Amino acid sequence: MEVQAKKRKLLLVDDEPLIGVLLKNKFQSTYEVTIKLNGLEGLSYILEGNVPDVIIIDLNMPVMGGIEFIQEIRKFNYLNHILLIVLSGEETAASRIEAFNVGADDFLIKPFNMSELSLRIDRFFTRYNFDKL
């Protein structure tokens, strides 16, 4: 009997439903995908004990935006291993710098290429030799 490898967990925090549909379609075969509509929902989900391997987050959302979410997540040492990628329509260098300064690992500008996003995620796990959790 073949044992199936445990899927990594991907959390998308974005208030645009289309982004959720696209990411779920792309990643659901290799990741357990969860979608939350703002930073507060995402933070609550994680603090309930659901620790993802990858978080993809938008910057501009209602209730709690991406920068505040990243700041909150990075307060907890046990969450520092999580790959945190920002997907945003914000094209300024200042936005990217702020995101990196608070703890983002990568930043892609919307519209983005799905294959590039997938490659960046795969490269992170390969480069840092993370075993499947």
Image (cartoon, grey):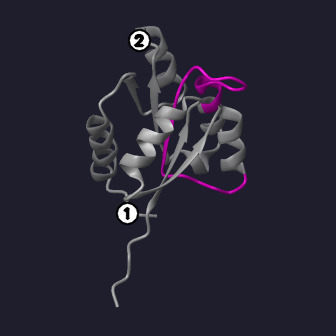
Check the image and report above or below for 5 versus 27: below
Amino acid carrying label 1: it is Asp
Task: Identify the residue at image location x=65%, y=33%.
Answer: 39
Residue at image position (37%, 63%) is 131
Q: Which residue is mark 1?
A: 131
- Left/right placement of residue 29 relative to residue 13 reads left
**Which callout, 2 or 1, points to the residue nearer the camera?**
2
Q: Which mark is residue 56?
A: none
* Residue at the extreme bottom of the image, as rendered: 1
The Cα atoms of the two marked residues, 2 and 1, are separated by 33 Å
Examine the residues drawn in magenta and state their main secondary structure: loop
Under mark 2, the amino acid is Glu
* Membership of 36 in magenta stretch: no
- In the rendered image of this protein, does residue 4 appear above or below residue 22? below
Nearer to us in this view, 22 or 54? 22
Residue under label 2? 91
Say if the magenta span includes residue 58.
yes
| Percent coordinates x, y for residue 27 in the rendering | 39, 50
Among the 4 quarters of the image, the one containing residue 49:
bottom right
Task: Give the extent of the magenta segment.
Answer: 48-69
